[in-house]
Image (cartoon, rainbow, N blue to C red):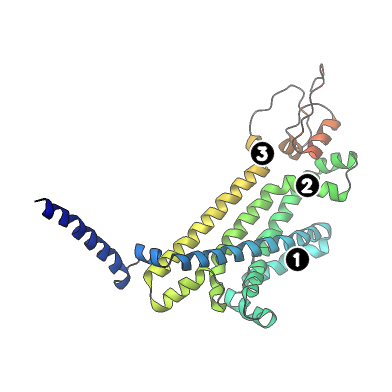
């Protein structure tokens, strides 16, 4: 009896293992054996995918920022900058890579450059919209405190424009995660290489597994950037709460959002605009 009982367990385990291994030969969509045997290949493709995405978004930010500043400063440059970035976004990805191949050759630079050009549309418009949403009163208060152009830009305007900027970065990042797969046409598509190879050979498990990882990367990147946005803009989480104090500064919406300033008079508004999160105590006896 005992021998029969012991023999039944290995037989069942062997049957399960055999069935699990058969998912490769059966070409099933969901196959744990594929993930186990191709784990290193999946990891390498994921690392390449993440590297291309991060590099393209960072480079796109470096290019989009001065373009947005130029479009805001000079009205004559606004139309050409916005128009050019929009036209670039309408170019099909295959045509874009074909145009870039003579310049960069076959390599990851082609994919990164293409993603940078595609990201400019979203980033330039969001940076420009964020900067233009800064209340003029906040700028005037900062100038009255002696802020120069660069200190005004990075100390007052950029903190207030962060929500719009981060929204653009999130959209550009998710789009880059998806568009990186097209780089498989030049051999540098990260997970896209596995997807295209799997489609050519009709390897279902490879196509589905690589696609699912790509989707998870996009969701994870968006969640991380959303968390970073909330960390960098703590005033956005408290902006809708009731204000306490009788003598709250009239100021501007931007100054109150950035600093939650309480007090009366123009000095309080200037401190709120320039100090970001500094609060000015209300003088005793003052009325709103």
Q: Residue at x 88, y 42 (%)?
A: 143
Residue 157, numbered circle: 2
Mark 3 vs 1, N-terminal side:
1
Residue 267 on image: x %, y %? 86, 31
- Residue position marked by numbered label 1 in the rendering: 81
Tell which residue pokes out farthest to the front in this image: 3
Extreme bottom residue here? 102
Disc with the residue nearer the chain's start (2 vs 1): 1
SS label for mark 2: helix
Circle 3 SS class: loop
Identify the residue at image location x=65%, y=61%: 57
- Among the 4 quarters of the image, the one containing residue 238: top right
For residue 99, the mark is none
Where is 96 relative to 122, above or below?
A: below
Please tell me in which quadrant of the rendered image residue 29 appears: bottom left
| Mark nearer the N terminus (2 vs 3) | 2
Residue at the left extreme, as displayed: 1
Badge 3: residue crowd in 10 Å (few <14, some 14–19, many ≥20): some
Instruction: Indicate whether 265 appears above or below 255.
Output: above
Q: Is residue 30 visible?
A: no
Measure the alpha-carbon separation of dots 2 and 1: 21 Å
Specify whether 247 is left or right of 227.
right
Side of 209 where 93 appears, left or right: right
Viewer-nearest of discs 3 and 1: 3
Whole-percent x, y for residue 171 in the image: 60, 57
Q: Label 3 belongs to which residue?
A: 234
Q: CA distance from mark 3 to mark 1?
A: 32 Å
Foreground pick, 201 / 97:
201
Name the side, left or right, on which 125 lies relative to 8: right
At a point 53% along the width and 75% down the height, the residue shown is 184
């Amino acid at each position: 009896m005992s021998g029969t009982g012991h023999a039944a367990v290995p037989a069942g385990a062997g049957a399960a293992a055999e069935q699990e291994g058969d998912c490769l030969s059966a070409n099933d969509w969901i196959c744990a054996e594929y993930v186990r045997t191709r784990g290193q290949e999946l990891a390498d493709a994921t690392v390449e995918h993440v590297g291309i995405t991060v590099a393209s978004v960072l480079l796109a930010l470096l290019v989009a920022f001065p373009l947005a500043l130029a479009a805001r400063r000079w009205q004559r440059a606004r139309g050409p900058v916005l128009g050019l970035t929009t036209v670039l976004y309408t170019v099909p990805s295959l045509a874009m890579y074909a145009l870039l191949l003579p310049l960069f050759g076959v390599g990851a630079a082609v994919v990164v450059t293409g993603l940078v050009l595609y990201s400019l549309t979203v980033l330039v418009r969001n940076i420009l919209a964020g900067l233009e949403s800064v209340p003029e009163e906040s700028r005037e208060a900062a100038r009255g405190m002696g802020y120069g152009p660069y200190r005004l830009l990075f100390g007052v305007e950029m903190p207030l424009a962060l929500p719009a900027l981060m929204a653009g970065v999130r959209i550009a990042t998710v789009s880059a995660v998806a568009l990186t797969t097209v780089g498989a046409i030049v051999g540098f598509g990260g997970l896209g290489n596995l997807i295209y190879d799997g489609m050519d050979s009709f390897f279902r498990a490879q196509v589905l597994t690589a696609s699912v990882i790509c989707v998870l990367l996009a969701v994870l990147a968006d969640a991380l950037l959303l968390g970073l946005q909330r960390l960098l803009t703590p005033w956005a989480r408290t902006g809708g709460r009731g204000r306490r104090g009788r003598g709250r500064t009239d100021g501007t919406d931007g100054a109150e959002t950035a600093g939650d300033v309480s007090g009366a008079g123009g000095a309080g508004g200037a401190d709120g605009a320039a100090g970001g999160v500094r609060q000015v105590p209300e003088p005793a006896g003052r009325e709103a």
